[in-house]
Image (tube, rainbow, N blue to C red):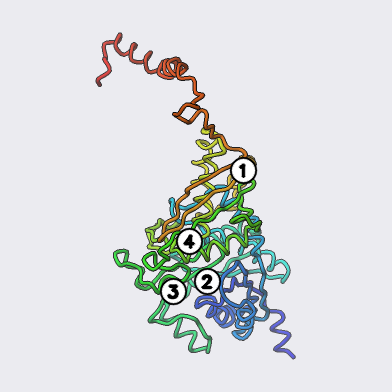
Amino acid sequence: MDEKQGSKQREKVVLAYSGGLDTSVLVRWLIEERGLDVVALTVDLGQPGEMEEVRRKALATGAVDAKVVDAREMFVADYLTPAIWANALYQGEYPLATALARPLIAKLQVEEAHRQGASYIAHGCTGKGNDQVRFEVATAALDPSLSVIAPMREWKMTREEEIDYARKWGIPVPVTVESPYSVDENLWGRSCECGVLEDPWREPPEDAYEWTTSPEKAPDEPLYLEIRFEGGLPVGMDGEPMDLLDITRRLNDVGGEHGVGRIDVIEDRLVGIKSREIYEAPAAVLIIKAHRDLEQLTLTREALAGKRPLEQRVSEMAYEALWFSPLNRAIEAFNRTLQERVTGVVRLKLYKGRATVVGRRSPNSLYDLGLATYDAADAFDHNAARGFIELWGLPLKVWARSEKEAGGGTDE
């Protein structure tokens, strides 16, 4: 009886729990080393696996409670939507699947800590990675009174030592020393690192990929598909109305089948080191490509010129743990306004790992055939060009005249 009462009086920690190597051993570590009652929180973001099995595993490992939250719709509405509006690709390559998920998981951790009366939250991130920053900065933005425990920074064990620790406590983990990939997945993409991938000269072996077919082995016939957008978001595919969640699943399947969405990149991590990352993101690649093209058709040059630098900033803020910043919210509001015009259909051709836009149309199109054509239907006033050129070049003409009068010439 006294032991149970003592257990009830122990403080609680809400652990972001995936059931992988790191978080599996951390349940036991938090119990043994910190004397805390562990509440395991698993967030369903469309990753493979049976969530109920993950929950049971957490309980079997020693957690006093284990929760599974289906956050797929929230992920789509509050994180993927603004990312699509911003054509978010970190350093022009990475669609930010993991980076976008972390602030959402942290938000749900904070909410669960409030329900449980927990004083701590914990994560399984290392001291080298970006995710530790994302979890902790997001937590500070949402509830600075909560303390964050990052055992992997204190532990400093190698992955081999982690595996041994798991074996010691009888904890099953889906990793071996022979295949030590670190993988993170959600419906927006899959990341894979560690092991042989740490050699940037070595071509990734095929076992590093799970979502995509090798382009060499992809179908010999191209696939054409159409994505319909309303308000800057996909709302249908090949003439069939679908929500964004279903479109993402479908595009991951067909894009992966045709080898689209493989990304091999040297990436600048937030903590100041370069890393080699392997990503698979068929749906993200296809949706962003189509969306960006449709924007070119429906937005003015001035709007695009203002929007494109902000897209880079959104990507950086998502990557750099500033998703909840006032600037990010302000840019989202700006993009929301512009997206009212981004409605139409984009036709894509998928072939041997490549995705190409081959057609687009929109009721809000700014493309005027009468102005663009060179045939008999040409409605452009060619005589107006002379006056335009004269006015456009006037500042340079005045500057050149001034330089000449000053004796400087224009050659220098």
Badge 2 crowding class, 10 Å Cα cut-off, few under 14, some 14 to 19, many 20 or more, is many
Q: Residue at x 48, y 65 (%)?
A: 256
Q: Residue at x 59, y 43 (%)?
A: 331
The quarter holding residue 147 reads bottom right
In the image, taking residue 140 as reference, residue 21 lies left or right, namely: left
Cα distance, mark 4 to mark 2?
A: 12 Å
> In the rendered structure, which amino acid carries the disc numbered 2?
Gly
Cα distance, mark 1 to mark 3?
A: 46 Å
Residue for badge 4: 130
> In the rendered structure, which amino acid carries the disc numbered 1?
Gln
Query: In the rendered structure, which disc, 2 or 1, sits on the residue that comes first in sequence?
Result: 2
| Nearest-to-viewer mark from 3 and 2 | 2
310, above or below 382, in the image: below
Residue for badge 1: 339
125, above or below 350, in the image: below
Q: Are marks 4 and 2 in contact (CB under 8 Å)?
A: no
Query: In the rendered structure, which disc, 3 or 4, sits on the residue that comes first in sequence?
Result: 4
Instruction: For mark 4, give the secondary structure.
Output: loop
Q: Are marks 4 and 1 in contact (CB under 8 Å)?
A: no
Query: In the rendered structure, which disc, 3 or 2, sits on the residue that comes first in sequence?
Result: 2
Evaluate whether residue 315 shows in this view. Answer: no
Question: For residue 156, which numbered disc appears in the image?
Answer: 3
| Nearest-to-viewer mark from 3 and 4 | 4
